[in-house]
Image (cartoon, rainbow, N blue to C red):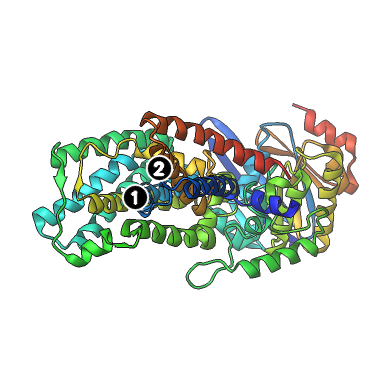
Amino acid sequence: MKKFIDNIRSKPAGGILLLFCTIQIIAIIAGLLYPENFRYLNPANIAVLLKSMSALGIMAIGVGILMISGEFDLSVGTLYTFCAIVTATMVKEYALSPYLAMIIGIIVGIIAGLIHGNIVNRFTIPSFIVTLGAMLLWKGGTLLYHGAKSLRYKYESETYKTVLTGDIGVIDASFLWFIAVGIIFYFIVHHHKIGNHFFAVGGNPEAAIAIGINPKRVKLIAFSIAGGCAALSGVVAMSRVGSVQPGGGLGLELEAIAACVIGGCALMGGRGSILGIMLGTALIYTIQDLLLLLRAPGFYFEMFVGGLIVLAVIINVTIRKRI
Amino acid sequence: MNQLNYYECKNVSKRYGNLTALDNVDFHIGKNEVVGLLGDNGAGKSTLIKMMSGVVAPDTGNVFVDGKETKISTRKQSEEIAGIETIYQNSALCDDMTIIRNIFMGREITNFFGFMDHKKMEDLSLEVLESGVHISGIDSPLKEIGALSGGQKQAVAIARAVYFKRKILLLDEPTSALSVRETERVLKYVTELKSENVSSVIVTHNLYHAFQVCDRFVVMSHGKVIFEKNKSETNLEEVTEQVIKV
């Protein structure tokens, strides 16, 4: 038993994994007991649940990596919309292939991240401030570039349709994108040396410098990942829905940070895991889904997620303290 | 120049605006030697340590390693050219990372694509923890640094330096956050390292500790070296007087 607790304690995602499994077990049992009134296990419900979490999930992975490195990005929400609109315009106005347009959109996101990172590094000001400014900049930029009309995103290619919006049973293509991004960054963050540097720079920047790691370079990489992930999530979400709202996206950055915090990322950096971030996202959407199934009014969702953030951090801290 | 000196800096000066942090300082580190770098707050000890470790670049002056003049202006150069490792009061470790990841921080063992070889790093960490500088009370290299005591942390930092075959350890107030017993242990490591051909420079306010382990004392004041004697030529009273005199 002690070994089991120790094992959970030593994993950054341990606490959240416990909470996630508990809620799943309760929901599944309830779903089996009352299949008519509580349709948690209904395929349609599972499909919607998996479909809805991918956009936030992809964004949260980038935000989480940046948080592990000790910085924030508040601009990912509006950047998400900006990059989606750039991608859609490339296809509509310039008749580019949707794949190429997608790559351009992601590159725009990466460049935006590099700009944020460069400003933070060069002037040594808090990323909170820089990206707060960037949040408004990208929001305004979207309106400047496109106007306030919503933009329909049509694509002729059948393959593109399948790759981004197809499904296998209840599993939506966008969910597979989320899982793929998660796996790629799992290997980068937890098994590549740059991942070790993310943790070092976020955990103790002086130590990183003393040992010869260049924190500015590491942070720049993390910023570009955050920007790239925001762009990818924008494109994935737009392709799934088939349109993009220039005013949308705002507020997603806080949900992404919430997902990371619920998933065990330390606010000041140095701690976190990809699995935790993914579970944090899944948990937010599971709660939303459960409330919908229970026919609770919409504002309950925000109240519950608010409570969940605090509860998850309490669990994480308590589990870590107890040996 | 003395053949025995492994590291030497001559006429080194460093100014921060109006403040002269180092004023024509001559300093050397011999082979198998523990140097006590003493002085009151603001004397320039930390600047000198930072200069030697490459974090701060001097305005003027020359640096010699093994008798050859060299330029050290980054942390990497001090590590590669002179084999210098610095250990701070709050050791250069990350609390949220395991001992393995701390030992190999910035020097991860990786394959061609940069992915870490966890097995090899774990085996080597075990070796580091078991041999050389013996660290008591650490049973697994998978433990997080945050779970260790202050003394154990310093021991990990020192073990890391030894493993990477450092020639010089710069210890900037290594014991000020430690208990009495932990302090004794860290000081013992420093003495043991001498026999493994690692020289050390210790910055400390505690002259008793300095007298316990150092072979030579250098006292700084207002950016200048004002006193330098071997242990055999001086005593605690004389050194104390030099440190407190204005």
Say if mark 1 contacts mark 2, CB within 8 Å. Answer: yes
Of the residues shown, which amino acid type is indicated by label 2?
Answer: Asp
Would residue A215 be found to the left or right of residue A2 on screen? left
Q: Nearer the viewer, residue A191 or B161?
A: A191
Q: Quadrant of the C terminus of chain A?
A: top right
The residue beneath circle 2 is A289
Residue B171 pos. (x, y %): 72, 47
Mark 1, Cα crowd under 10 Å, few <14 / some 14-19 / many 20+, is some
Give the residue at x 34% y 43%.
Answer: A76
Label 1, label 2: how many angstroms apart (C-alpha)?
Answer: 9 Å
Q: Which residue is mark 1?
A: A48
Q: Give whichever of A308, A98 is nearer the camera.
A: A308
Q: Quadrant of residue B227?
A: top right
Q: Amino acid at mark 1?
A: Val
The percent position of residue A108, horizontal first and vertical second, equals: 26, 51
Asked whether B219 or B181 is in front, the reply is B181
**Residue in the image at 27% along x and 64% along y:** A163
| Chain of the residue under the numbered disc 1 shown in the image | A
